[in-house]
Image (cartoon, coloured by chain):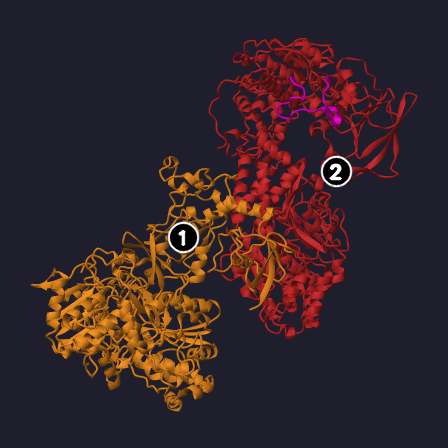
């Protein structure tokens, strides 16, 4: 039979199917679908159809790539478009049969999209979905659309037309066509395919081999599997084309045995090809003969390396050998051999089927065509994708992948599997092509793409990849076998807190040696994860090494409980939670007080990074740690004072400049260590930002006062209304050491015309004036510029001062707002309006009225912070009228010049990050004055470090930790927990809030608190 | 060969095309560090120490894998290169007991230094047996490494001590793969390979079993190639002095060094620079020598039987007694059995003693039991009965027919050559009823029924003639009698051949085509061809086949009998035969006799004497009354042991001269203690006619003396003159004067290596290949053949065929190997190898005790149920006295060569019930 005849028959069958008068159902039944439960869905569909006596045609297709939505089906009723439904369960599936097939209700609520000429109300076009729209499907052209077990489906969709064209060409012409297409090897190295073929073609020898490398081994990679499961013929056709071009008569598909379905698909495809005369002797009646064998690999990663792969086919241990000679000269059984990867072969059949010119119209100058990726990890839409070369990474992560789930921060994207690298947010604008990725230190690889969020520890990631390459090294060459072992050891030491400062340099040196000295690609690329993570995340390495801190709270050797580890002050969260659970809030306070002198304040206003890392959050809700702290503080009996010790007086005097959380914490601990401490406060009242930055409805003044009183009761003297302008003076007064905790009390200006107007008031001044009881008139309409907590505080304060209309203008979107989500919620509930993607450009004032000229923004490419940069939309200017405008775009410290201290960007003080020492002897600094506007708990942590360093400076040991709580009863790690969500925080009804500053959050009662505390997994007790 | 020019470190160098950069550098005297490189092995590129920079080549290629090319510019000592090398070595050190290597005071370190007491001994070089010879040490010294920036990663593998001769200590292994590659590339055994991955990678056996339970053949080749102490001999005594000599086991004649210390041989190593073995050795040669030399049961003093008991005597007493007794007998009443294990000089002296002192030609030796048909057969066909081509050519053959030879077990070093040939593309045809190890490497395996070789070979020749694959030019120009021979092929239609041999006709056709078309082709055969009652016909058939295809007289061709004993060739050459003086000169030829009578100054008998087998027959009839037996053990080696014992017991006087009290020696009236090969000077002639030196390494044990000394002493006592040699070299001078082929041989000429016979004159360089321009007899003679069935065929009472042979771990009657503890540990009993089908039919399991019974006797042994034996055939080796298989064998003789049919007799097997 000629292909024309075969094709005519196949097309007829396909048409009949397309125009069938029965409903048709396509179900994604590749491995990914099956893992998600597709076969259960299939059973349910069949049962529901039978129950309703409906004859439908069910076709099992491969993976269309929307892995996040598996199990996935599409239903076509005669004369209607395909409608795709995702995330199905057997129940939903039977429901759909009932609703759509029986009752003709297409259920837009369950549908993902439709394909076909007509559209259905409420259902978008599938190919217009953000995940699919940017994609170009060449290698995956048939995946998920045809029955991979039916060769007619492939042929009806122009399959094997490339082969027919090939047979009409000379081998040289075929190679020329591939060269013109610009196709490069999709296995990862990107060697020009046509050139490789030409070498093999020109190698002397009667027997030549063509091999398809389907030994997909990268963790997280599943492109080859999906392609073979979804469209085996596209690969096999490519092999035929290659064999013809190179003069090979025998071919192998080297596929890992862990891919049983793909193997099954290949076997049935080969059987059907043989039936049609498409493989074997005299293919399609020509002189061209080609036989294909399937060789199952045992799962050794190194067998993806071509020389190791060939050794494995030969029945030897899969170990690479040195090149030259190259496989094109001496390959399988010492005969000229060509190896290409699965995706390359599929592209080959597409190129011959269409044309080299068409193919080369996609991609960049040096990287033509498309590339498939398996998008996995911390991304909303995981899946198998195919994109044109040159697409920016962010388009993949945010456009196709839909960004990071759960409002977490993006941290890195890993390309190329264990041989690749981790690229940070500021490289998200990188175009995906061979050269750009290599320049950034990563590689294209075969297409694994793993997204990581802030909960991923970058050192741990490097450790993971090294443990993979180490255990997969074939053991042959010294560099790879022992070099990776040493690198792994060093990384494990870093993750376990056993590292040395010089380890980073040692790692770098070793990585370079392993890279240059290894025999094969496995060893040569094994250091890439280390090199890129050090290149882009060196600070995280240093944190691990110098501070034994893992910011993702992942490294087991450093982290006992993620909450405590994440708490800047290191509060032993699980222990106090256990006291609360046992009805002992006073004991809980004692635990908290072991690390911080402000339990009540923190219970109300802490931004609780601990909760973000709470492991319970992976199950249901993170524990309400802050609320529990508040509960404990409210039920304090002063038990903590029983064990409190104060050292005998040392005779040393310490001056604390600024009585905010940093200063008072330092003062508290220094006083306990026996030093005489005086705190100087420029404002009339102590407390710093806690006093003048946080509105009363969040932090009532008396609660703050009570905690400050406890500090004073230890002997700390607080002098208010004293502004310190010179450190020299303090030394002259006999102070032995000085701590500068002067905060960041100066609002940052907008930098637009007209902001000097008296009705434009920066948020710091605004909140301070209100806090200190000054009369502030805001008028009716108030605009707040900014998206942080200060903006929210200002907006809600303005409402309480009587403004009738409060609008926040923010230049990015809600997803990027730095303010706490619950604060934003409260503000919205209280009636604050937020305009996103708007930025002010000019303020004009007339008659006590302000006119704010704004421009609308759109989000562009990623900036260095890893957020998409807002860019003005030209011609989108508009104006709004206000009575008051409050810029809340940031604060900066005011550092008197006479301090004679160096400041850096944002006017912050430069210090040694570990000891907090300034460049001047005896002077230490911390808190917002150093970090810029941050949080209470971070300031407290700085105060603690300052106390340690100052005590040491004064000759002490710096030991500030103490045990204040009584010993607790034994408890164990909670191995299994039932799903249970955190209780709502009772709050004052909105109606009762707006004319006063009464505390809004009401706190948990005892029952709720105990119940919530019992949800704790007690990670600190995990073995 | 093409020459290329390249530059290394600025130095202009010429190298052969095909060389690697490393080889080129080495040949120019430029040092490049390396650990995994080994000149005997294929490039590997694993240790990364030989990395270099080459202009216009990306990265740092390894010198050991990169071929030279013209104009190449190489730098071997750049900072980048040095960095990789240092890192590689430091990484190896993290994984190797290495504290000493970076110790700042290792130069001054003494074995009793204090640090030794406080740490595990394996941490230290000073306690490592490889200290000073370790290649890792060498590289560390070269790179000047004094510190280790990495943490030590310690692994603690239990040391594999299962092998009796060497240990595998994986803790010291650097995974250079030299052992693994040696086991694959050199020995073809493949007992070890890498297992596991990553840091867990290690050298392992199949199934990670102890070495002794693997297919390891204990040859120790891996030990020799190990650069560190991962593979070390168990005995690590270091020699003070080394003496170059020749291995005393099989006919290969491997060149070895005996290392001595305090008059003891403590080490044996192969001589890398000399053929035929070029350093390679088998388990017996490497590990089976010191054990017997210094065995406590060595005979150290003469023994005289008094009242049925052997009692110690002085040499004077013993020699006096022998001289007195032997002198009384007529020439036809005495016989001498010489030894293929003794030197050429000793064989010469003993035959001279027989002829001159005792006046008899009754002299023979154990070559009669295996090699005689070669002399007879090849003598008729070619004019001389010896291997036609050298061993070292075999690897260049393109076709190999290995028939009746279990080469890898009986001649392991020749086995290496065969495997090497196959690796480089030669086509191997194995013809053997048993599935011997070589079958693994064979293109074609012909499993003929025992005793049907003539039919098989004639069948092949019929195909060659029918298909016109013969070499008509060679036949017409170099050979004669072809037409008669061709006519004799007519009765060998393939149907008949298939019926006789049991080999499918297609396979015979294939084999014929492969042999005839893969030129050069060589034929190797062993006792499977000769030990038949038509052994001479078998030999002739091989000769016909070689001539038919012109595969003779050229490199890598020929007919190559592999001789069993170290000096079988020499003993024959030097006249330890009843019908020939030295140099195969017939005793019946009057002019020859006259020449010898003139030289030896006495009359000589004019008729041939009795062969070995005939002597025993004659003794059993009490015609032969006395035997002087040197270094033989007929009680185990001859067929039909009962008959042999009876014959020996009937003798009036038996003298046995040996190094151990063998089974035969126990029957003797006088036992004389001989010296081992390590204790005397002389020469052996190996299977490829190479005369090689045996050198005295130590003084004879106790009161023993070399055999030549003893025989000379006896000769002097009886005859007085002609035996006053002060040194074997003087004997060789006399040999050279009387033996045409040995005319050019002298100890002086052999000093730097052996010479291949014939070497008629002192300036003749020796003859590696025989029959190059003409056959020894002029024209090669085609001899027509008929198929004759074996003498004893199975019947209802004895339904199985017993075939016998050799095994790897023992030699001949076990006189030597049976004394070596380690060899006994590897094999301490003979097994009856029986086909599973036969075993099932007889209700026999693996390792059952069975009785094997023939018409002549019975032995008991354990079974090994194995497919290696074909249905209807059982196999036993004949080495060990515990199961003396020659109790069973047939005394049927080849009518020409008088060799007994040791390869075939009819037996039955009975299971011995447990507890009986």
Q: Is the Cβ of the residue at disc 1 closer than 8 Å to that at disc 2?
A: no
Q: What stretch is highlighted in magenta?
A: A899-924
Where does label 1 land, which residue?
Answer: B208
What element does badge 1 sit on? helix
Graded by Cα atoms within 10 Å as few (under 14), some (14 to 19) or many (20 or more), the crowding at tag 1 reads some
Instruction: Identify the hue of chain A.
Output: red
Q: Mark 2 lies on which chain?
A: A
Mark 1 chain: B
Foreground residue among A489 and B55: B55
Task: Using the rendered image of the protein, determine whether residue A968 is visible from the camera's viewpoint.
Answer: yes
Q: Hey, which residue is sitting farthest right in the picture?
A: A847
Asked if residue B500 lies left or right of residue B50, the reply is left
Q: Position of residue B95 (x, y in %)?
A: 47, 44
Picture quadrant of residue B355: bottom left
- Residue at far left of view: B307
Query: Which SS type dominates the magenta stretch?
Result: loop
Of A507 and B843, the residue lying toward us: A507
Q: Do labels 1 and 2 share a chain?
A: no
Q: Estimate the x, y position of residue B439 in percent, counting from the top left.
A: 40, 69
For chain B, give the colour.
orange
Q: Residue A922 magenta-drawn?
A: yes
The span from disc 1 to disc 2 (Cα, nearest Å) is 56 Å
Q: Quadrant of the C terminus of chain B?
A: bottom left
Residue at 59% x, 68% y is A208
Picture coordinates of residue B747, whole percent (x, y):
32, 68
The secondary element bearing badge 2 is classed as loop
Q: Residues within 10 Å of mark 2 (few under 14, many from 20)?
A: some
Q: What residue would you read off at disc 2?
A: A863
């Amino acid at each position: 039979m000629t292909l024309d005849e075969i094709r005519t028959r196949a097309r007829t069958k396909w048409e009949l199917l397309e125009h069938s008068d029965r409903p048709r159902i396509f179900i994604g039944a590749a491995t990914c679908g099956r893992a998600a439960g597709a076969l259960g869905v299939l059973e349910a569909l069949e049962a529901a159809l039978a129950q309703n006596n409906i004859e439908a045609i069910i076709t099992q297709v491969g993976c269309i790539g929307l892995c996040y939505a598996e199990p996935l089906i599409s239903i076509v009723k005669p004369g209607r478009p395909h409608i795709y439904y995702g995330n199905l369960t057997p129940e939903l599936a039977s429901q759909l049969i009932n609703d759509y097939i029986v009752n003709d209700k297409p259920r837009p609520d369950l549908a993902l999209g439709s394909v076909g000429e007509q559209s259905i109300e409420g259902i978008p076009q599938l190919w217009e979905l953000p995940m699919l729209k940017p994609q170009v499907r060449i290698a995956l052209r048939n995946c998920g659309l045809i029955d991979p077990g039916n060769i007619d489906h492939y042929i009806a969709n122009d399959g094997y037309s490339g082969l027919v064209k090939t047979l009409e060409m000379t081998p040289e012409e075929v190679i020329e066509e591939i060269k013109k297409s610009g196709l490069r090897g999709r296995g990862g190295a990107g060697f020009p395919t046509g050139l490789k073929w030409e070498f093999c073609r020109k190698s002397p020898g009667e027997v030549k081999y063509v091999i398809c490398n389907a030994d997909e081994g990268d963790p997280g990679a599943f492109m080859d599997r999906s392609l073979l499961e979804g469209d085996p013929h596209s690969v096999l056709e490519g092999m035929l084309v290659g064999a013809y071009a190179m003069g090979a008569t025998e071919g192998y598909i080297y596929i890992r045995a862990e891919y049983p379905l793909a193997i099954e698909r290949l076997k049935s495809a080969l059987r059907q090809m043989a039936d049609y005369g498409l493989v074997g002797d005299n293919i399609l009646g020509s002189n061209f003969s080609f036989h294909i064998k399937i060789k199952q690999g045992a799962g050794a990663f190194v067998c993806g390396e071509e020389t190791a792969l060939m050794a494995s086919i030969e029945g030897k241990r899969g170990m690479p050998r040195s090149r030259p000679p190259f496989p094109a000269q001496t390959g399988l059984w010492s005969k000229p051999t060509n190896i290409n990867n699965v995706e390359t072969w599929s592209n080959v059949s597409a190129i011959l089927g269409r044309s080299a010119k068409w193919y080369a119209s996609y991609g960049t100058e040096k990287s033509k065509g498309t590339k498939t990726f398996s998008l996995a990890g911390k991304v909303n839409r995981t899946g198998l994708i195919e994109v044109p070369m040159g697409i920016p990474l962010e388009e993949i992560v945010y456009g196709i992948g839909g960004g990071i789930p759960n409002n977490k921060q993006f941290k890195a994207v890993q390309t190329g599997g264990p041989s690749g690298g981790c690229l940070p947010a500021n490289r998200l604008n990188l175009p995906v092509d061979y050269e750009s990725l290599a320049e950034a230190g990563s590689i294209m690889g075969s297409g694994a793409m793993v997204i990581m969020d802030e909960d991923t520890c970058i050192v741990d990631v490097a450790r993971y990849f090294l443990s993979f390459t180490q255990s997969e090294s074939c053991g042959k060459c010294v560099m790879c076998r022992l070099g990776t072992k040493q690198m792994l050891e060093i990384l494990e030491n870093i993750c376990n807190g056993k590292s040395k400062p010089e380890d980073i340099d040692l790692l770098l040196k070793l990585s370079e040696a392993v890279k240059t000295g290894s025999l094969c690609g496995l060893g040569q690329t094994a250091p890439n994860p280390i090199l890129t993570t050090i290149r882009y995340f060196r600070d995280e390495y240093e944190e691990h090494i110098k501070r034994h801190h893992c910011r993702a709270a992942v490294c087991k050797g450093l982290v006992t409980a993620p909450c405590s580890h994440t708490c800047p002050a290191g509060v032993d969260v699980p222990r106090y939670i256990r006291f609360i659970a046992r009805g002992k809030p006073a004991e809980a306070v004692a635990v908290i007080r072991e690390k911080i002198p402000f339990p009540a304040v923190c219970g109300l206003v802490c931004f609780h990074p601990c909760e973000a890392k709470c492991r319970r959050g992976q199950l249901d809700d993170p524990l309400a740690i802050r609320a529990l702290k508040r509960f404990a503080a409210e039920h304090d009996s002063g038990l903590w004072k029983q064990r409190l010790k104060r050292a005998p007086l040392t005779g040393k005097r310490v001056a604390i400049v600024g009585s905010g959380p940093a200063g008072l914490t330092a003062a508290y601990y220094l006083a306990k260590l026996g030093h005489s401490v005086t705190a100087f406060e420029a404002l009339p009242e102590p407390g710093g930002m806690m006093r003048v930055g946080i509105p009363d409805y969040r932090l009532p003044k008396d609660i703050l006062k009570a905690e400050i009183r406890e500090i004073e009761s230890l002997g700390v003297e607080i002098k208010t209304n004293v502004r310190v302008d010179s450190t020299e003076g303090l030394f002259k007064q006999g102070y032995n050491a000085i701590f500068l905790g002067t905060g960041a009390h100066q609002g940052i200006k907008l930098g637009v015309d007209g902001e000097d107007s008296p009705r434009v008031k920066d948020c710091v001044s605004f909140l301070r004036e209100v806090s200190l009881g000054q009369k502030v008139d805001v008028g009716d309409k108030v605009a707040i510029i900014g998206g942080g907590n200060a903006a929210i505080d200002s907006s809600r304060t303005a409402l309480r001062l009587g403004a009738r209309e409060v609008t926040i203008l923010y230049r990015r979107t809600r997803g990027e707002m730095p303010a706490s989500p619950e604060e934003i919620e409260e503000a919205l509930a209280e009636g604050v309006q937020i305009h996103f993607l708007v930025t002010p450009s000019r303020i004009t004032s007339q008659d006590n009225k302000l006119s704010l000229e704004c421009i609308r923004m759109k989000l562009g490419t990623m900036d260095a912070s890893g957020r998409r940069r807002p860019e003005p939309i030209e011609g989108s200017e508009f104006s709004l009228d206000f009575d008051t405008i409050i810029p809340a775009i940031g604060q900066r410290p005011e550092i008197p010049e006479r301090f004679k201290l160096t400041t850096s960007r944002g006017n912050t003080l430069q210090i040694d990050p570990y000891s907090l020492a300034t460049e001047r002897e005896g002077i230490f600094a911390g808190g917002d004055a150093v970090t810029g506007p941050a949080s209470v708990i971070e300031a407290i942590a700085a105060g603690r470090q300052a106390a340690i360093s100052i005590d040491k400076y004064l000759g002490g040991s710096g030991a500030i930790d103490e045990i204040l709580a009584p010993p607790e009863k034994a408890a164990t790690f909670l191995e299994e927990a039932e799903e249970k969500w955190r209780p709502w925080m009772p709050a004052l009804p909105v109606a009762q809030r707006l004319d006063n500053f009464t505390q809004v959050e009401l706190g948990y009662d005892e029952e709720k608190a105990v119940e919530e505390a019992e949800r704790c997994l007690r990670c600190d007790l995990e073995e | 060969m093409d020459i290329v020019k390249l530059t290394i470190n600025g130095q202009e160098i010429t190298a052969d095309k095909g060389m690697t950069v490393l080889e080129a550098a080495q040949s120019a005297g430029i040092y490049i560090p390396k650990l995994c490189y080994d000149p005997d092995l294929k490039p590997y590129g694993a240790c990364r120490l030989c990395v270099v920079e080459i202009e216009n080549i990306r990265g740092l290629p390894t010198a050991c894998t990169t071929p030279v090319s013209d104009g190449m510019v190489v730098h071997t000592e750049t900072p980048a290169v040095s960095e990789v090398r240092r890192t590689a070595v430091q990484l190896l050190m993290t994984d190797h007991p290495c504290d000493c290597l970076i110790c700042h005071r290792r130069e001054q370190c003494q074995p009793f230094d204090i640090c030794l007491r406080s740490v595990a001994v394996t941490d230290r070089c000073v306690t490592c047996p490889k200290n000073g010879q370790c290649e890792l040490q060498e590289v560390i010294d070269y790179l000047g490494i004094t510190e280790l920036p990495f943490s030590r990663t310690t692994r603690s593998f239990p040391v594999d001590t299962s092998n009796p001769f060497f240990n595998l200590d994986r803790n010291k292994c650097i995974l250079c793969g030299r052992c693994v590659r040696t086991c694959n590339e050199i020995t073809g055994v493949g007992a070890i390979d890498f297992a596991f991955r990553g840091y867990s990678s290690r050298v392992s056996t199949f199934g990670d079993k102890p070495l002794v339970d693997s297919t390891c053949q204990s040859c120790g080749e891996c030990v020799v190639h190990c650069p560190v102490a991962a593979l070390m001999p168990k005995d690590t005594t270091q020699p003070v002095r080394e003496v170059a000599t020749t291995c005393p086991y099989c006919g290969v004649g491997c060149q070895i060094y005996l290392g001595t210390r305090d008059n003891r041989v403590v080490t044996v190593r192969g001589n890398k620079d000399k053929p035929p073995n070029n350093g390679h050795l088998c388990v017996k040669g490497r590990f089976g020598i010191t054990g017997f030399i210094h065995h406590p049961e060595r005979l150290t003093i003469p023994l005289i039987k008094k009242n049925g008991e052997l009692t110690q005597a002085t040499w004077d007493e013993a020699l006096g007694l022998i001289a007195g007794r032997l002198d009384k007998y007529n020439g036809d009443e005495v016989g001498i059995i010489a030894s293929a294990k003794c030197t050429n000089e000793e064989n010469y002296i003993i035959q001279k003693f027989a002829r001159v002192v005792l006046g008899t030609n009754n002299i023979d030796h154990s070559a009669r039991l295996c090699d005689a048909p070669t002399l007879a057969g090849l003598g008729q066909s070619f004019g001389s009965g010896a291997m036609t081509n050298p061993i070292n050519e075999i690897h260049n053959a393109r076709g190999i027919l290995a028939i009746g030879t279990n080469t890898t077990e009986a001649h392991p070093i020749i086995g290496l050559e065969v495997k090497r040939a196959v690796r480089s593309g030669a086509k191997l045809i194995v013809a053997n009823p048993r599935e011997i190890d070589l079958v693994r490497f064979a293109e074609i395996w012909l499993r003929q029924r025992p005793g049907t070789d003539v039919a098989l070979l004639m069948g092949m020749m019929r195909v060659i003639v029918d298909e016109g694959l013969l070499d008509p030019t060679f036949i017409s120009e170099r050979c004669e009698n072809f037409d008669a021979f061709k006519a004799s092929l007519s009765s060998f239609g393939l149907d008949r051949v298939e019926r006789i041999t049991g080999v499918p006709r297609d396979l015979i056709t294939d084999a014929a085509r492969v042999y005839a078309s893969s030129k050069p082709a060589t034929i190797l055969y062993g006792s499977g061809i000769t030990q038949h009652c038509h052994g001479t016909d078998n030999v002739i058939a091989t000769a016909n086949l070689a001539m038919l295809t012109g595969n003779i007289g050229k490199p890598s061709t020929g007919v190559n009998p592999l001789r069993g004993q170290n000096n079988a060739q020499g003993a024959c050459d030097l006249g330890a035969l009843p019908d020939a003086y030295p140099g195969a000169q017939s005793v019946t030829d009057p002019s020859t006799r006259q020449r010898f009578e003139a030289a030896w100054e006495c009359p000589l008998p004019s008729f041939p004497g009795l062969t070995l087998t005939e002597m025993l027959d004659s003794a059993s009839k009490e015609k032969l009354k006395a035997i002087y037996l040197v270094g033989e053990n007929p009680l185990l080696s001859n067929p039909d042991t009962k008959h042999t014992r009876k014959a020996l017991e009937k003798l009036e006087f038996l003298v046995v001269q040996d190094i151990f009290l063998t089974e035969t020696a126990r029957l003797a009236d006088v036992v004389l203690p001989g010296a081992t090969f390590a204790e005397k000077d002389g020469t052996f002639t190996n299977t490829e006619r190479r005369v090689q030196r045996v050198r005295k390494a130590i003084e004879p044990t106790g009161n023993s003396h070399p055999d030549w000394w003893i025989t000379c002493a006896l000769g002097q006592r009886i005859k007085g003159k002609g035996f006053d040699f002060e040194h074997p070299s003087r004997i060789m001078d006399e040999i050279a004067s009387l033996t045409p082929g040995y005319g050019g041989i002298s100890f002086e000429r052999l000093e730097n290596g052996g010479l291949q016979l014939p070497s008629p004159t002192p300036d003749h360089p020796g003859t590696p290949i025989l029959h190059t321009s003409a056959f020894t007899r002029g024209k090669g003679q085609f001899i027509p053949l008929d198929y004759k069935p074996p003498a004893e065929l199975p019947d209802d009472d004895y339904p199985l065929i017993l075939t016998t042979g050799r095994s790897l771990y023992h030699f001949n009657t076990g006189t030597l190997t049976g004394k070596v503890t380690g060899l006994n540990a590897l094999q301490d009993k003979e097994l009856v190898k029986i086909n599973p089908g036969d075993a099932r039919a007889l209700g026999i399991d693996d390792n059952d005790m069975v009785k094997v019974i023939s018409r002549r006797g019975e032995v008991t042994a354990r079974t090994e149920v194995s497919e290696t034996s074909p249905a209807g055939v059982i196999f036993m080796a004949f080495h060990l006295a515990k199961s003396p298989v020659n109790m069973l064998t047939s005394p049927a003789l080849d009518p020409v060569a008088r060799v007994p049919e040791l390869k075939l007799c009819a037996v039955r097997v009975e299971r011995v019930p447990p507890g009986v």
